[in-house]
Image (tube, rainbow, N blue to C red):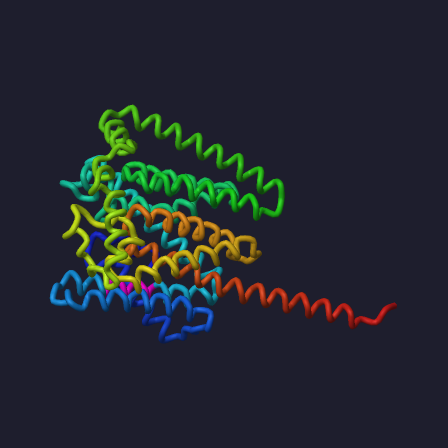
Amino acid sequence: MGLGGAIVFIEPSPYEIFALTSVVVFAATGLRMRPAFLPLALLLFVLNLGYTICAVPLLDQQPIVYWILTSWYMAVTAIFIALVVSEDTAARLHYLRSGLIAGAVIASLAGIAGYLRLTPGELFTLYGRAAGTFKDPNVFGAYLVLPALFCLQSVVSDRFGRSLRSTILLGIITLALLLAFSRAAWGLLALTAAFMLLLMMLTSQTNRQRSRIVVMAIAALVAVALVLMILLQFDFIRDMFEQRASFDQKYDEGRFGRFGRHLLGAQMALDLPLGIGPLQFNKFFPEDTHNSFLNAFMSGGWISGVVYPALVFTTALIGFRYIFARTPWQRPYLAVFSAYLGTVGEAFIIDTDHWRHFWLMLGLMWGMFVATQRHMANTRHATEHDVAHLQGIPAR
């Protein structure tokens, strides 16, 4: 399932096939629905109920039906991942992490090959930007962030052999992300990597670990800077980089630019309790909302507009609670939490509603919440048992 998430430019994608297969297999072998998951299930249900209610007048249009079904499907995958990861957490996270990294490398190599015109036509590219095995360079770049963070963790904390392999993989993924020329993805990787490394330093148990993180992080930053300097020597890369790195973009400015649409859409949302329905915003404005929170109001009315931020921000707030919890999966938790938090921030400037990897991260967060609660309870119980046992030993 982690591997299949990297190949989504064909329909149905391997992700859908692997996800449905996983649901069937795990359902047949047993999944435990714990009370702690009820808030997640309830929020997802109400969110999609709002979408469905507002789409009723539009259900004669096939794209609307597909959009609604996709939203319900994403909710199911989030709950499924949460249930799966809450059991045998460390092992299942290891396999999922391996699949995500392998998929990211495949997608990255495809994107690099497409950008260098090693593939026919516009395969693996869009508008002169690397898109890999995705339909959109922006989604491609955002998807690569979590696997990149996993590799970066290995680079700064694992032994030499594994660290070297991870350095190579990180180089491939980072190069592809740069060639996607997505400003949001660039910023997302930089901010989430810095935040994750800070959390790793704060949670490290020895000064030696902290020192290595600092040294390796500086080395990685220098390496990225050197690669970027080399890439900018090529005119076709430099021109695209200068164009994309500029904050002066026509589609961001003006009354109907990205941010202008946000203000106008917010005014509409206050007057429309039932919104305007899914995929209708671009009929009133030149482009889509490019804001997941605004899109929730537009597509699902006040119901979804209130529940969507409640869902994503509640998850983020709970996430801070378990940063310092000593668990066998603390390291991947910090990577997922950092990537999730960054994607929530990115949702203010782009539509993340149907990003498979966003709902995957949401499910991972809740699964690790429950697993961490159980681990802490078991540790506390074992400690109390040991203390009681020691107190029962007769004095010599």
Q: Nearer the viewer, residue 22 or 64?
A: 64
Horizontal side of residue 35 vs 309, given as left or right: right
Main SS, magenta residues: helix
Query: Most extreme residue toward the left, as rendered?
Result: 60
Residue 81 is at least partly visible in this image: yes
Query: Which range is magenta?
Result: 69-77
Identify the residue at image location x=19%, y=55%.
Answer: 10
Asked if residue 349 lies in the magenta stretch, the reply is: no
Q: Position of residue 274 (x, y in %)?
A: 23, 64
Identify the image quadrant of the C terminus: bottom right
- Please tell me whether residue 35 is drawn above or below residue 181 in the rendered image: below
Q: Is residue 125 above or below residue 226?
A: below
The foreground one among 3 and 148 is: 148
Tell me what residue is drawn at x 29 percent, y 24 percent. Answer: 233
- The image shows residue 319 at horizontal and vertical percentages of 48, 56
- When asked about the image quadrant of residue 252, the answer is top left
Q: Position of residue 213 (x, y in %)?
A: 53, 39
Q: Quadrant of residue 64?
A: bottom left
- Image side of residue 79 versus residue 130, left or right: right
